[in-house]
Amino acid sequence: MNLKRMLAGCAVATALVLAPMSAPSFADAAPAPTGVPAAVPLSSTPKIAKWQELQYGMFMHFGVYSVYGGYYNGHRQGMGYPEQIKAWEHIPTDDYLLKAKDLAANFDASAICKTVHDSGMKYLMITSKHHDGFAMWDTKTTDYNIVKQSNYGKDPMKELSTECNKLGVKLAFYFSIIDWTKQTPEPYGNVNPIDEDLMTTVIKPQLTELLTNYGSIAELWFDMGGPTAEQSQRMAQWVHELQPETMVNSRVWNKAGDFEVGGDNSVTTDFHMGPWESIRSIYPACWGYCSWANRDESAKSYKERELVNNLIGTVASGGQFAYNIGPKGDGTIDAFDTGVVTEVGQWMARHPDAITGARPTWYPAPNWGKVMTKGNDLYFFPELWSPGKTLTLPSVGGHVTGVTVDGTDRSLEFTQDGTTLTVTMSGENPEPNLRPVLKVTFDGAPTYVPTQTVTAVDGATISSEQFFGRASALRYSGAQAYDAYLVNKTDKALTDLTLKFSGNFDASTTYKITLGTTSIEVTGAQIEAGEVGEGLTLEPGKVTPLRLELAHPAYYANPIGLRSVSATLHVYGENAATQPPVIATDPASVSVKAGESATFTVVASGRPAATIQWYRVPKGSTEGTAIPDATSAMYTLTTTLEDDGAQFYAVATNANGSTASQRATLTVTKGSDNLALNKTASMSSVGWGGTASRAVDGNTDGVWDNGSVAHTGKQANPWWEVDLGETHPLGVVNVWNRSSSDNCQGISCDQRLHDFWVVASTERLAASFNPATAGAVDGVHMIKVDGVGGRPSAVDFEGFDARFIRVIQPTEFGEFALAEVEAFAAAAPTPDPDDQEPPVIKPLTVTANPAEDAQISGDGAFRTVTAKEGTQVTIKAEATGTPTPTLFWQIKREGSDSWAILEEENGPE
C-alpha cells in the first residue's frame, strides 16, 4: 500500500512536469493584514492629553525642614522623613521659626528652572506647604510664611513662576491637606480628620491664592489627611473652578482626583491604563534635604542608571515620572544631586526622540527591556548590551527599513520574519554608563499585529487567552478593560455581527463594547441573556480591536470587575432572517427605602434589534404612561413615597412587531430613622484601609471581606466619630462590633473592641480627648461599655442633646474595628394626663382650581363638591389637642362600602 501511494505521487509530479501548459493556476497569497497603530494614544480628553505630554518632571521638597537637613540639636533624626522633623523631634514652634530666618538665603529661581530644563524635564512641582503648615508663598491667610518669617523676605513661588515660564517649564504645586498649626501632629499615619474650619478658613483660601496668583498650574498634588468623600470632592472642585486645566492627583482621596499616584518611591514598570504618575526621590529615605545622604562620587553612576531605568520604565508603561530632589536650607541644590539629573538630561539630548514626545506601545513587554515609538520609528531600550545576542519583538506590523544605534549612523543587522522582528546587537556598548537606545525605522508608522489575533470568517471563538487584560491605574485592582483583536481575511466586509460573552458579569452594570470605531452599551443582564451588538461590522484586510469596559465608571480607574472573559462572534450577513421582538428577561420587582434609587432591567431579542420604551402605571391604575427619555434596557429613578405600589414595564419594538414585558412592582418604604446613616464620619487614624464611612453605610454584618468595616490604626486612645449634622435629643446608640468569625492571628478579631466609651457632645471634641480622665464636661455625656463590644452594644443617652457621637478606646497602644454605629432620637416624652386634651377638628375649608369649574356646598365637617373632570380640589382641616394630633385622610370610592386611609396624606391639607 505504501508503495502504491509513493508511485501515485510520482505520477502526478511527472504529469505536472511533462504538461506545463495544463498546470493549474494558484491564487496569490493573501496580503498580511493591516495592523492597528502601535502607539498607545494620548487621552481623548484634551486636558489630560496636554498633561500626559509633559512626561517627566522634577519634584522638589523645600521648606523650613530643609534648614535642619535631618539633624536636631546635634543628633540625626531617628525616625521618619526629614521634612517631618518638627513632629518627630517635637520641635517647639518658636525654635522652628528661628530656623526659618535662614531659609532660602541663596535661593535662585533662575538657576533651578534652568536645571529642570537642561535635565530634559517639562515641569517643576514644588511644596507650597507641607504638613508643618508653613506657607512657602506670600499668603494673606497666615503670618506663618516665608515672606514674614525669613530674612529672604520674598515669594519663591512667584519667582519660580516667572523664571520657569521663560524656559517653557510648567509649574505644579504640592499641597498638604493636614496642617500642624491647626491639628495635632501624628506622623505615624498623617491621616488627621479634616474639620470644616480647616476647610473654609485655610484650605480653600490658600488654594485660591495658589491658583490665582502664579499663572497656569499644571498639577495640584494633594497629600495626606483623612478627608471625607464630600470634602475630597469639594477640594477637587475648588481647583477645577479656578483652573479647569489643572490636574488633581489621587491623594485628594476618595477617588476624587484626575490621575492616580502610587506610594512613595513606588515606581511602576508594568503597563497600566492612564493617566497615572510615579514618584521617586533621589534618596528614598528623604524627600526634603538630608545632609547625611551618600553623595560620594562612587555612588553617582549608580544614581544616574537608577534614574534612567525609572524614567524609561515609567513612561514606556504609560505613566508620568516625577523625580524628587530636596534643596538645602539656603535654597541651593547640592552639586551631586544636580549632576545626576543633568547627566540624564545629556543622555536625553543624545536621544532626543526616544523619550520626549514618544509614546508607549501595545506590544507585550519583551523580556530584554522596553519599547517606545514616535513617528515612523520604534525605540528599543535593552537592559544589557551583549554583542551577538538578539532582541526579538513579536507582533510587529509594517516594513522595517533599517536599524541603527540611536544618535549615530551605526547600522545593526535585523530580520523581519512575518510579524517577528529580530535585531542583533554588535560592537561596543554605545551607552556604557547609562542605557543604550536602538532606533528601528519603518516606511510608515509602526503597527501592531498581535499573535493572538482571531480570524473571523463565518464566525469566531475568542478564548480568555486571546483577551488582554489592561491593568487599571488603581494599583492591584485588576483589569480596567479587556482587549481582543479580530481580522477579516475575506475580500468583503462581514456585516450584521453579534457577540456572545462569557464571564462573571454584574446584571445591573452597564458595559461598553467597542469594535473598531463603533461602540454600544449593554447591561450585564443583556450580556448574560444572549447575543449583543447586532449591526456591528468587520472590515476586510485589517486587524480590528475589540474592547470591553465599564460604560460609566464612577471613577475613571475603577476596574471592570471580571476575572476573565471569552466571547463568540456570530456573522449573520445582509440576508439574515428577521423576527419580532421577544422578551428574554422581564424586569424584576424592587423594594427600596424612600430617597434610594430603583433600577429595572429588561432584555429583548429580535431582528432587527428592538427599541425599548418604559411605562409607569400608578398605584391603583391599570393604564401605563410612557416615561420620557426612558428608552434603554435599564431604567433608574430616585424614589419617593409617592412611587410606592407603582408598576413598570417595557415595550420592545422593531419592524416586525412589538411585545410588552411583565410588570414589575416598586415598593417604597419610609427611610431609616438612624440619624447616623451616611453622615460624615472621621477617625483618629485609618488601619488596613477601613475608612470611617464604612461604619455609617447601613451594613451591620461585620465581615471584613465584605468591605463594610471601619478600622483604626494602632495608636494611643484610638477613636471614631460621626457628625449628625445638627443637634438631636439622643436615645439609643447601637455600636456594632466586627464579626467574631473574622480571625486575626489566631484570635477572634472582635476582641479588638473592648472596654470602650461612647461619648455624645454638642461640639466636636479635641482629638486628644480621653473620657477616662476627663471628668465632668459641659455639653458632653460619656457612657462606658465594659468587656468586648457586642453586636450591638446598646447605650441609651435618654434624650441628651448632641450632634457628635464618638467611640473611644482608652489605651496606651491599640486599635479597634466597627461594623456600624446607629443613632436614634429619643422618644418624645409622654404628656401628663392632666395636660392632655382630646383632638378637635375645626370646620373644613374647600377650594377648587379653576373655581368656576366647581360648585361647593355644605358646612361644618361636611362638604359636597361637584366639579368637572380635571379640576384640582383642595380640602384643609385644622386639628387641635394635646399632644398635637396627627391627621389621617380617608377616602370611600364609588361602589365601595368601606373607607380607606390615604397613606401618604397625614398633614392638614
Image: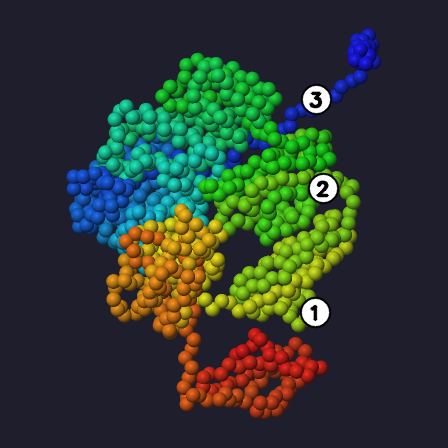
| Residue 321: x %, y % from top left | 40, 35
Q: Give the amino acid at mark 2.
A: Asp
* Residue 642 at x, y percent in the picture: 58, 70
Judging by the rendered image, the residue that carries numbered circle 1 is 622
Q: Pick the residue in front: 98 or 508.
A: 508
**Residue 568 in the figure: left or right of residue 322:** right
Marks 3 & 1, CB-CB < 8 Å contact:
no
Q: Nearer the viewer, residue 54 or 711?
A: 711
Q: Residue shown at 30%/26% (left/top)?
A: 300
Instruction: Tell me the residue that label 2 is attached to.
Output: 496
Pinpoint residue 296: horizontal percent, then vertical percent: 25, 26
In the structure shown, which secondary structural element does the residue marked by tag 3 occupy? loop
The three-letter code of the residue at mark 1 reads: Thr
The vertical placement of 865 against 534, above or below, is: below
Task: Look at 62% across and 68% down and name the residue there.
Answer: 645
Q: Which residue is mark 3?
A: 29
Distance CA(mark 3)–CA(mark 1): 66 Å
**Which residue appears farthest toward the bottom when viewing the image?**
859
Q: Position of residue 353 (x, y in %)?
A: 45, 27
Instruction: Give the foreground label among 3 and 1.
Output: 1
Q: Is residue 242 visible?
A: no
